[in-house]
C-alpha cells in the first residue's frame, strides 16, 4: 500500500527520522509504536505530506508521492486524523462530514452563484454518505451541533468519520485513543476493527497504549530515536529486549501488562 | 428640521449606509467566511472608485481620461480592477497568517494611497476628479436625483447580498468556512487551501471596488480624502463585528446601525463649541470604539451570529432515520 524508502528528516542538526524504510500491507491494521521522541508523528507527517523529507521516497501503490502537497495526497486516497482534534469548530457535525466529501462542482464559486442545479445530485449523494457515516459512528443525535461543542471523544469519532468520507485507500490514525476514556476507546477500537474486517479499509496507527495496539494490530513496527527498531506481531515485539530497553532504558520489565 | 430636509437627510444616510453595506458584505466574504484579515479595505475601495471615475468622467486635461463611458461599464470595470489588485495582493500575501496578512494589507493600501496622491497625471492628485456622472443622469433634477440614486444603490446591495448568500449556502462556502476553522484539516480532506483563499480575497476585493465606484458616483467628485482608512477600513470592521461576522444579514444590519450612530453623532458634535468641533471626528471615533467594546462584551459574535445554512434535504430525512 504505502512504501517508505530511506526516509531521513532533519531539523537543523537533529535527525528526527533517520533512514527509515518499510512497507505497509493492504487490508491490514499496522501499528507504529515507540517511546516519545521516536519520530512517529514526524513520519506520519511525511506520509501525509505535511512535511517533505530531507531525503528518501514515499510511494503510494507504486506512485511516487514524496513531494505531493497534502490535499493532492488526499485525492490519491490517503486520509488522516490528528493527535489533537482538528474539527471545523463553527460547522455542524453534519457539515464537518459533508465538507470532506467530494463536491468538486459545488466548490466552484461560479456554479455556487449561477448554476446551483449543477451540484444538487452530488450534494445529495454526499449528504446520504454523511448520514450513513454518522449512523455508523453513533453520532446522528448530535448532527446539528456545532463540532466545537463536542466532547473530546466525540471529536475523535468525528475525525474518523471525516476520513471515511474520503473513501480512502489508507487511513492514518495519529493517537486516536489519546485523552479519551476507556469505554469510548473500546468503542472506537470496535469501529476500526469493523471497518477493517467488513469493509477492507487499511489502517496505520500511532499509539502509546500497547493494550490497544494488541487488540487491533496484526503488524507492529517499533521505532526508537528515529529508526525502526523491530517489527512483528505484538507478542513478538513485547518480549523483544531492545523494545523493553527503548521504553524503559534497560532493566527487566514486562512492557504493557 | 423640516420634514423635507429630514427626508433628504434620510436619503443621504441610506445611500451611504448602502455603500457601507456592500463593503461589509465584501469583508464578510473575506473575514466571515474565509478568516482573512484584510485591513486594507480602503485600498480596494480606492482602486474601484478611481477606475469608475476615470472611465465615466468628462475629459479633463488634469488627469487621465475621462472617457465618458456609461456608469454601469465603470462599475463593472471597478470590480475587475479591484479584483485584479486583490489577486496580486493575494498572490504575494495569502500564505501569511492572519495578523501578518493584516499588516501587509494595511501597507499595500497605504502604497495605493500614496500613488493616488502623487501620480498627478493619473488622478489629479489631491485636487481630485470632478464631473463624475451618476446613472440615469438628467432623468431627475436636483435632490430628486438622490432618490433615484438611492434606489440604484440598494438594487446593487440586493444583488450583492444574493450573490453572497448563494456563495455562503454552497459547498464552496462550506469549504471556505472549514479552511477558516482549520487549514490543516481542510488540506487533509483534499481542499486546496491557497486556491480557496485566493478566490475569497479576489471576490471580496471586487465587491469593495464596486462600493468605491458607487461612492465616487454619489459625490460626483473624488479626491484621496474619500478613501481615508479611518472612514473606510476601520468603520467597516466595526460594522461587521457589531453586526455579526459570518452572517450576511448581520453585515447589512451592522452597516445600517453603526452608520446611523455615526451620522447622529455628527449632529451632536456639530453643536459643540468651535474648539471641540474641529476634533469632532476623533471624538466620534472614540464613541464608535466604545460602542464596539460594548457590543463585543455583550454580544460576542455580533447582533446576528453566524449560522450554518443547513442542508435543504436534511429535514425530510430526519423522519426516516428516526
Image: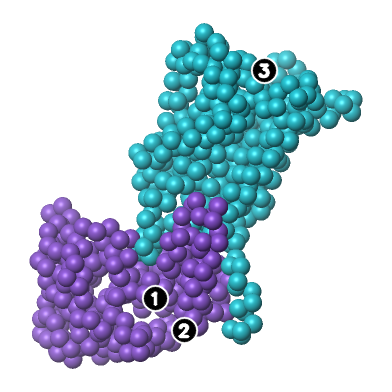
Q: Nearer the viewer, mark 2 or mark 3?
A: 2
A71 on left or right of B305: left
**Relative to the observer, which residue lies in front, A119 or B99?**
A119
Q: Residue at x 44, y 20 (%)?
A: B115
**Res. A97 visible in picture:** yes
**Res. B225 visible in picture:** no
x, y percentage for residue B253? Answer: 69, 45
Circle 1 residue: A164
Contact check, label 2 and label 1, Cβ < 8 Å: yes
Say whether disc 2 or disc 1 marks the residue closer to the N-terminus.
Answer: 2
For the N terminus of chain A, the quadrant is: bottom left
x, y percentage for residue B25? Answer: 59, 44
**Relative to the observer, which residue lies in front, A238 or A46?**
A46
Q: CA distance from mark 1 to mark 3?
A: 63 Å
Q: CA distance from mark 2 to mark 1?
A: 11 Å
* Res B310 quadrant in image: bottom right
Q: Report which colour depicts chain B.
A: cyan
* Chain on which label 2 sits: A
For the C terminus of chain A, the quadrant is: bottom left
Circle 2 residue: A136
**Secondary structure under the numbered disc 3 in the rendered image:** loop
Chain letter for the purple part = A
x, y percentage for residue B76? Answer: 55, 34
B79 on left or right of B6: left
Amino acid at each position: 500500500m504505502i512504501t517508505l524508502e530511506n526516509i531521513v528528516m532533519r531539523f537543523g542538526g537533529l535527525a528526527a527520522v533517520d533512514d527509515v524504510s518499510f512497507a505497509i500491507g493492504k487490508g491490514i491494521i499496522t501499528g507504529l509504536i515507540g517511546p516519545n521522541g521516536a519520530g512517529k508523528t514526524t513520519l506520519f507527517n511525511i506520509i501525509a505530506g505535511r512535511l517533505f523529507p530531507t531525503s528518501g521516497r514515499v510511494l503510494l501503490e507504486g506512485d511516487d508521492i514524496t513531494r505531493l502537497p497534502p490535499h493532492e495526497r488526499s485525492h490519491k486516497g490517503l486520509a488522516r486524523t490528528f493527535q489533537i482534534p482538528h474539527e471545523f469548530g463553527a460547522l455542524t457535525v453534519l457539515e464537518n462530514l459533508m465538507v470532506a466529501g467530494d463536491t468538486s462542482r459545488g466548490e466552484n464559486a461560479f456554479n455556487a452563484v449561477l448554476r446551483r442545479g449543477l451540484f444538487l445530485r452530488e450534494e445529495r449523494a454526499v449528504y446520504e454518505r454523511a448520514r450513513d457515516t454518522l449512523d455508523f459512528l453513533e453520532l446522528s443525535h448530535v448532527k446539528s451541533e456545532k463540532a466545537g461543542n463536542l466532547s473530546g471523544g466525540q471529536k475523535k469519532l468525528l475525525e474518523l468519520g471525516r476520513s471515511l468520507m474520503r473513501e480512502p485507500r489508507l487511513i492514518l490514525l495519529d493517537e486516536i485513543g489519546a485523552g479519551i476514556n476507556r469505554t469510548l476507546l473500546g468503542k472506537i477500537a470496535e469501529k476500526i476493527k469493523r471497518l477493517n474486517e467488513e469493509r477492507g479499509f487499511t489502517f496505520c496507527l500511532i499509539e502509546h497504549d500497547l493494550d490497544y495496539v494488541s487488540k487491533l494490530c496484526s503488524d507492529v513496527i517499533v521505532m526508537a530515536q528515529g529508526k525502526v527498531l523491530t517489527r512483528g506481531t505484538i507478542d513478538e515485539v513485547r518480549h523483544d529486549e531492545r523494545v523493553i530497553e527503548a521504553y524503559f532504558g534497560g532493566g527487566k520489565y514486562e512492557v504493557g501488562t | 428640521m423640516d420634514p423635507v430636509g429630514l427626508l433628504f437627510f434620510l436619503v443621504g444616510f441610506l445611500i451611504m449606509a448602502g455603500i457601507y453595506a456592500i463593503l461589509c458584505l465584501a469583508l464578510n466574504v473575506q473575514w466571515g467566511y474565509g478568516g482573512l484579515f484584510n485591513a486594507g479595505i480602503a485600498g480596494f475601495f480606492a482602486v474601484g472608485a478611481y477606475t469608475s471615475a476615470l472611465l465615466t468622467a468628462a475629459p479633463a486635461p488634469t488627469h487621465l481620461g475621462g472617457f465618458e463611458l456609461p456608469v454601469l461599464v465603470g462599475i463593472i470595470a471597478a470590480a475587475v480592477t479591484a479584483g485584479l489588485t486583490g489577486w496580486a495582493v493575494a498572490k504575494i500575501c495569502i500564505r501569511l497568517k492572519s495578523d501578518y496578512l493584516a499588516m501587509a494589507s494595511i501597507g499595500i493600501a497605504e502604497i495605493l494611497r500614496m500613488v493616488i496622491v502623487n501620480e498627478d497625471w493619473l488622478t489629479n492628485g489631491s485636487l481630485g476628479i470632478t464631473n463624475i456622472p451618476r446613472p440615469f443622469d438628467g432623468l431627475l433634477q436636483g435632490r430628486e436625483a438622490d432618490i433615484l440614486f438611492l434606489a440604484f444603490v440598494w438594487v446593487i446591495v440586493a444583488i450583492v447580498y444574493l450573490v453572497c448568500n448563494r456563495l455562503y449556502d454552497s459547498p464552496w462556502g462550506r469549504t471556505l468556512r472549514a479552511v477558516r476553522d482549520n487549514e490543516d484539516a481542510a488540506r487533509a480532506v483534499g481542499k486546496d487551501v491557497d486556491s480557496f483563499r485566493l478566490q475569497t480575497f479576489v471576490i471580496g476585493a471586487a465587491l469593495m471596488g464596486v462600493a468605491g465606484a458607487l461612492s465616487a458616483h454619489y459625490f460626483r467628485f473624488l479626491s484621496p480624502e474619500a478613501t481615508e482608512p479611518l472612514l473606510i477600513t476601520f468603520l467597516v470592521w466595526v460594522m461587521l463585528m457589531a453586526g455579526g461576522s459570518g452572517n450576511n444579514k448581520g453585515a447589512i444590519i451592522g452597516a445600517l446601525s453603526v452608520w446611523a450612530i455615526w451620522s447622529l453623532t455628527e449632529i451632536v458634535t456639530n453643536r459643540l463649541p468651535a474648539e471641540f468641533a474641529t476634533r469632532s471626528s476623533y471624538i466620534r471615533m472614540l464613541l464608535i470604539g466604545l460602542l464596539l467594546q460594548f457590543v463585543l462584551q455583550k454580544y460576542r459574535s455580533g447582533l446576528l451570529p453566524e449560522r450554518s445554512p443547513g442542508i435543504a434535504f436534511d429535514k425530510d430525512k430526519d423522519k426516516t432515520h428516526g
